[in-house]
Image (tube, rainbow, N blue to C red):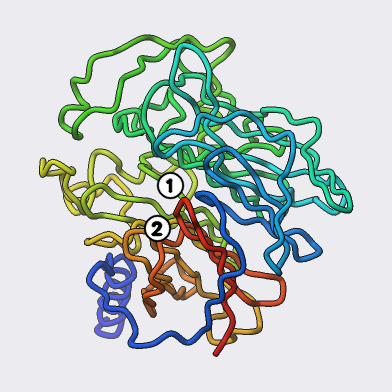
Amino acid sequence: MKQLLITGILLALAATQAEAQINAGEQQPEPSLPFNMVQVATLDLPWRIAFLPDGRMLITEKVGAMQLVTQQGAKTPVKNVPAVLWRGQGGMLGVYLSPHYAKDHSVYLTYSEPGEPGGSSLALARAKLKLGQDSASLEDLKVIWRDGERGEGGQFGAAVAFSPDGNYLFLTVGDRQRMTPAQDPNQPLGKILRLTLDGQPAKGNPMAGKTGAASVPVIDPPQDTEAAKIAPVVRTYTFPGPNLTPSETWSSGHRTPYGLAFAPDGRLWEIEHGPKGGDELNLIERGKNYGWPLASYATNYDGVPIPSPDTRPDLTKPVIYWTPVIAPGNFVFYNGTLFPQWKGSALVSGLASKTLNRITFDGQGCAKPAERWDVGHRIRDVAVDPDGSLWMIEDSKTGGLFHVTPK
């Protein structure tokens, strides 16, 4: 009996430790960099990098363009990109190769799509990438998913991750700075969606087969989470067909989900911005609610308090949070050979902190901060070259493309 009691206590302690949240906001940078950074090109507000099999990169520019870039820095504009509304946090955002690119030559794009009655909405499109000797273009582009509400606000999310089996697509949809829709099951804002490769609701989702309200209220971004509760409705959006939002939704309660990636062990992780504090790294699991705007390890920008996640056991807490913020741009899991000490960890780009951050994982759903390196630039994206080196892009009108190799 005594042995059973001791075992029970140890298991309880282990569970408590496994669930403990880590604040990495006060972490100090390492005294030196273990890598070299060489700038090879300059781009106009670059957002995302996607590697082609031959080592060239597709890089989106928020202003509404996409470039095909060689590793020597030569740029070729990609033709036939869709129209975007470049304003604030909106514009040309993500680019992702199809998991079956070798066969279908398809790429997926996320961007802020203009349209009536004003503002913009997040759109997910698929197109064929046609490459010539000195040319690149998108052909047969088709929007396969969109948020038809449109309206005002930034925080589009716009990150895509494909399931390890290559059969499904996960899409992050930000709250558009409207806050309360992240808890409304009838609106895609503030959600992570699980879709087929054609943009349809995937089988096995938590609310598969269910439809939502025929119409939803649209609000403008309020001042804070308290004001959001009584924000006036500026108009009502009516879905053109059945509201498929419930059957598309995988998780809810997200603010600005800019990064989404599967770990080598198959777990799905997401990284998002908090308001004044409270950036989050979340382990994404089926049907869970991650709390925004009901709880956050942060306050509103105007100082209005937000309840702590510790007061809401019904909501899922982040594994790591950052107060003060790093303002994560994106993250990627590393499985290359040039930095063998990083294998299996994730590299997180920091905008406000101008850092590259390494996170380690234990394979049991826990993560810990490792190093933080001050790189002196607002890093929007970090990507792993097939040769194991890194490439980083800078959030600037004269944003650098940097090649990162070991010292």
Amino acid carrying label 1: it is Pro
Eye-nearest disc, 1 or 2: 2
Q: Position of residue 154 (x, y in %)?
A: 39, 35
Q: Residues within 10 Å of mark 2 (few under 14, many from 20)?
A: many
The residue at which mark 1 appears reads as 257
Q: Position of residue 127 (x, y in %)?
A: 75, 37
Q: Nearer the viewer, residue 360 or 113?
A: 113
Is residue 261 rendered to the left or right of residue 53? left
Q: Secondary structure at mark 1?
A: strand
Q: Which mark is residue 328?
A: 2
Q: Residue at x 44, y 56 (%)?
A: 329
The tally of labels here is: 2
Q: Position of residue 100 (x, y in %)?
A: 80, 50
Q: Residue at x 36, y 40 (%)?
A: 253
Q: Residue at x 41, y 72 (%)?
A: 357
Mark 1 to mark 2: distance in Å? 9 Å
Q: Residues within 10 Å of mark 1 (few under 14, many from 20)?
A: many
Q: Secondary structure at mark 2?
A: strand
